[in-house]
Image (tube, rainbow, N blue to C red):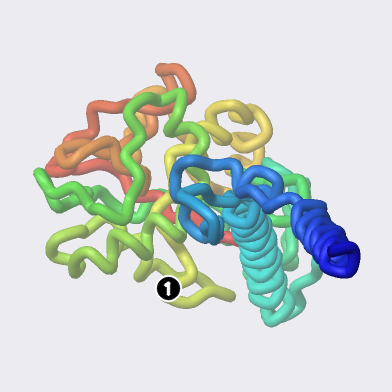
């Protein structure tokens, strides 16, 4: 009996030891492994032990995607600046020289405050971005034209519902390209007339229909700009001058200049009306 009792006791001890070893390691839970969301999420990982998700990965992917988009936008802006510089340096005798508002602009793509009688003036600087780029307005009007496309809202153009907002639009040539893409010269006469204008030192396609913000820049700097037009033999704007911009208000109206109104703009330019076209040239 003693021998049997001895073996039985030994067997019980060994069994206990094995049982204790198995219960020392706790069973992992979803929360302990980082799966804390009770709702599924795009790019998330599901817990293998239950209906929980780890959404940290999804958030990190979204954050990284946003950063990539931000950097891509910055690269795009840099590329645009490079393209602008490339256009300037390919012009004859052009220089990366600052041309300020009111400067007379010449056919060799140089500028000066006072008239240089040895050169041919083609316009006056009416806008500059402070970085050596800007827009030059032609010395005179090239005629009166309809904006065109009455009752048609060009989907690629932004609609500016107030002069306060429209004054910020300086994309003369970008706007012009969108309008021309929407129809030929019989449908949109004003922008095509501006596009076909040319002078000594420029070709058809160089000039554009001014954006609303260009008229606001003129309105805010009338003394300097009018002085430039006088020196260069050009025509000054007055409070009775109504010229088309390339900025759209809605399907029936586009912004015109009006130097007796705030921001130098008028919102009642029906697209079927005939107003002045005064092209601008970007440099």
Q: Is residue 273 left or right of residue 181?
A: left
Instruction: Give the crowd class for mark 1: few <14, some 14-19, many >=20 residues within 10 Å.
Output: some
The quadrant holding residue 90 is: bottom right
Above-or-below relation of 106 to 93? above
Which image quarter is the C terminus in?
bottom right
- Please tell me whether mark 1 sits on a helix, a strand or a loop: loop
Which image quarter is the N terminus in?
bottom right
Where residue 46 sits in the image (x, y, percent)?
52, 58
Q: Is residue 3 left or right of residue 22?
A: right
Q: Is residue 42 left or right of residue 16?
A: left
Residue in view at x 39 percent, y 55 percent: 175
Residue in view at x 69 percent, y 42 percent: 101
Residue assigned mark 1: 205
Between residue 233 and residue 143, name the one nearer to us: 143
Q: Is residue 86 visible?
A: yes
Where residue 148 sits in the image (x, y, percent)?
17, 52
Q: Is residue 77 visible?
A: no
Between residue 176 and residue 43, name the one nearer to us: 43
Above-or-below relation of 16 to 167? below
């Amino acid at each position: 009996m003693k021998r049997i009792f001895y073996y039985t006791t030994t067997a019980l001890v060994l069994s206990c030891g094995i049982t204790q070893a198995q219960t020392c390691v706790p069973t992992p839970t979803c929360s302990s492994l980082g799966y804390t969301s009770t709702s599924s999420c795009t790019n998330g990982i599901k817990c293998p032990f239950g209906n929980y998700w780890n959404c940290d990965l999804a958030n990190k992917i979204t954050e990284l995607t946003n950063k990539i988009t931000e950097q891509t936008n910055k690269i795009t802006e840099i590329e645009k600046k490079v393209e602008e510089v490339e256009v300037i340096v390919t012009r004859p005798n052009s220089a990366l020289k600052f041309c300020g508002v009111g400067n007379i602009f010449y056919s060799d793509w140089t500028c000066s405050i006072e008239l240089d009688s040895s050169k041919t003036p083609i316009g006056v600087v009416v806008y500059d971005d402070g970085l050596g780029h800007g827009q030059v307005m032609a010395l005179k009007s090239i005629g009166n034209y309809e904006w065109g496309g009455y009752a048609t809202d060009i989907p690629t153009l932004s609609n500016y519902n107030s002069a306060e907002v429209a004054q910020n639009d300086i994309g003369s040539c970008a706007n012009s390209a969108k309008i021309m893409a929407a129809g030929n010269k019989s449908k949109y006469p004003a922008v095509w007339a501006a596009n076909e204008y040319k002078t000594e030192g420029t070709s058809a396609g160089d000039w554009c229909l001014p954006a609303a913000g260009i008229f606001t820049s003129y309105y805010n700097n009338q003394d300097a700009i009018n002085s430039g037009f006088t020196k260069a033999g050009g025509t000054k704007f007055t409070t009775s001058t109504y010229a088309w911009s390339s900025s759209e208000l809605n399907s029936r109206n586009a912004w015109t200049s009006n130097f007796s109104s705030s921001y130098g703009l008028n919102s009642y330019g029906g697209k079927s009306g005939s107003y002045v076209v005064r092209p601008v040239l970007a440099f």
